[in-house]
Image (cartoon, grey):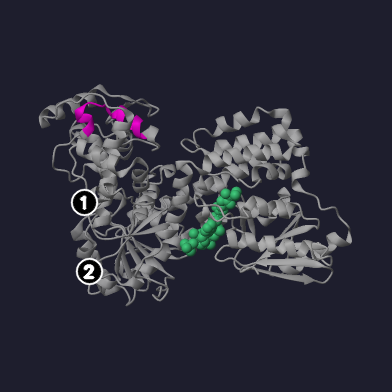
Amino acid sequence: MSEVGTYTVEDGGIGVMTIDNPPVNALGIAARLALQEGFRRFEGDAAVKAIVVICAGRTFFAGADITEFGKTPQEPNLLAVLDIIEGSSKPVVAAIHGTALGGGFELALTCNYRVAVPSAKVGLPEVNLGLLPGAGGTQRLPRIVGVPAALDIITGGKPIGAQKALEYGMIDALAEEGKLREDAVAFARKVVAEGKPAARVRDRNEKLEEARADMGQFDAYIAKNARAWRGFKAQVAIVRSIQAAVETAPDFDAGFKRERELFHELVTSTESAALRYYFFAEREVAKIPDIGKDVATLPVAKVGVIGAGTMGGGITMNFLNVGLPVTLVEMNQEALDRGLGVIRKNYENTAKKGRMTQEQVEQRMALIDPKIGLEALADVDLVIEAVFEEMSVKKDIFGKLDTICKPGAILASNTSFLDLNEIASATSRPEAVVGMHYFSPANVMRLLEVVRGAKTSREVVKTAMELGKTTGKVAVLAGVCHGFIANRVMVQRSLQAEQLVLEGPSPQDVDQALYDYGFAMGPFAMADLVGLDVTTRGVTERTLRTDLVKLDRLGQKKNGGFYDYDENRKATPSPVAAQVIADLAKFKGVAPKGALSTEEIVGRLLYPVVNEGAKVLEAGIALRACDIDVACILGYNWPLYTGGPMFWADTVGLQKVVDGLKAAGIEPAKLLAEKAAKGESFTR
Ligand code: T1G
């Protein structure tokens, strides 16, 4: 008897098997056994004329069970179950609600018909896990939608709404919302009544034969996307697998054999292991051990933002985007108007790209209540302060908010490094003070560091974390320290970079090494883009940046910086910067050590990030290593296919990281040294 399957026979001989394997009906062993059981029953029951496969709970099968990858396979495996379905002697109808994804949609493609409610989504998102659809998806989908659409759908990995899926032919009919079971059974009855043949997707070859006229399209597709796919493996494998379908049609099994080979290469790759790790990491960071379902979330229906500058404007947009009204406060009309202008311009640019309507622009702008003075914040549920990073300014504002804001209001600071406990000490309600640290541009970057002060209440922390999710962010909890998680660990990279160029390698050597590693841009090019004057504010000691600023070299915006720039902002190595580097090396008595290999440069710059990550863990600033990885990937675009600094360190081997740090004269963190000595890891 199956644990998760129930089987009934409806009028007209329609066998209905309902699979209930929460939370998302992943096709783990229990679900596979239930399907096998269902087909055994219905195949053997002469009264059954057709079969409906439906899921209970929030969704149709959301794919293979990702937690089973890398473990000892349990039989029947997914392919065996799909063979049973496709080999059924009776028409099979998939009844789809929620998200039929990956192996779940591949299962539906082995059924003869697919019926879905309008709210359903279908898709093959395996590329997001560094994989390709390995249960026939790259062979069956192009047979339905054609090659160009299949290339876009599978390399893109985005789910498709039921209506669009109907237009594509990925589903055969829409059921009425809330009446999926009845409508699917009725559809099956109609198939039986019409004696329709149980057509199999695998036998539809016309679209593949058509595609054979342009075999160059596959190389062209890869070339067109080379830049976007840099460092990833799955996308090219997907194109080659679809190409194999075209080359081998009508021999389905030959194409499928190629798909399996490519799938195996990917599933055993470090890239896919990193992406699968990241899939669970992004969900794990939402879990805070001492804040469970029993802790209440505070109501937030109205938000206040102080400061309409770059950060304040971006933060405001996050709330407008989900329909939450924002009282936007500035100290003078000019600053307020400028801020409103930037927000409107951002929305209008999005509208120009067709990603929102002008009406939506007006709707969002209408949600802003622009005000001069803090008094306007008396009735908001949450205030987020995004003003100048000066402790006295922050404490003055929080002291005033303490008298203005209603009881129960959350007082949040967007500070990126100041001591939140000291800010909270300016109020009589430190339990209501929390850090909500956004990354610029705040309406784009998905990371939100929620900073928990010594007295911040669990309700306030929970509310801030959940608000992050509802406004499209991934919230990561951080303790109070200088730079919290992402800034604190990543600053090691630029500090090391500026030390390293004093020893020999040039800025372009260093930037190229990190570019090859997978960063979109190296630390020196990034510094020139941000502006050297911005990052040297308040810096008293002599550094390369302060020396360059002294020469009025502020970066791309003025006179170059670490690089020289032409009128198209194209960077070239700078003899002036090279001289500044040589002069500072001499001043600091740094002896040249000559050129380093790319791997050595990467180690010099990124091992210290891992080391600082270990210190952040030791200090309890981050709850888990995966919190550091999520923060660096979303806050600093650390290459996703490496899994982030901590996962990557495990890939490299912690002993090698420790040896690299020691060779650079850096003391390994206690936790890192201990784990290396014990052969342990941070994330595996
Ligand atoms: N396997 C195992 N666990 C899964 C899972 C899966 N496929 N999908 C979700 N979970 C867990 C998740 O970790 C979380 O656990 C809980 O379910 C709720 O998820 C052969 C190789 C379906 C859109 O890539 O995109 O099929 O944290 O928080 O926001 O070709 O989950 O509660 O302990 O995300 O409502 C392809 C992955 C697999 C879809 C729901 N399928 N899932 O989103 O909830 S590879 C996917 C999702 C494959 C074949 C290949 C989303 C969702 P916990 P959640 P949600």
Please tell me the numbered disc located at residue 137: none
Q: Residue at left 45%, top 59%?
A: 283
* Residue at the spot of label 1: 670
The image position of residue 85, as x and y in percent, is 72, 55
Can residue 165 be seen? no
Q: Residue at left 44%, top 46%?
A: 274
- 253 and 195: which is toward the camera: 253
Q: Residue at left 57%, top 47%?
A: 157
Q: Residue furthest top?
A: 575
Q: Is label 1 or label 2 in front?
A: 1
What is the CA distance from the residue labelled 1 to the residue labelled 2?
40 Å
Q: Amino acid at mark 1?
A: Lys
**SS state under label 1:** helix
* Picture layout, residue 646 above or below residue 369: above
Q: Which residues are magenta?
A: 500-514
* Residue at the spot of label 2: 399
Q: Residue at left 42%, top 64%?
A: 467
**SS state under label 2:** helix
The image position of residue 660, as x and y in percent, is 25, 37
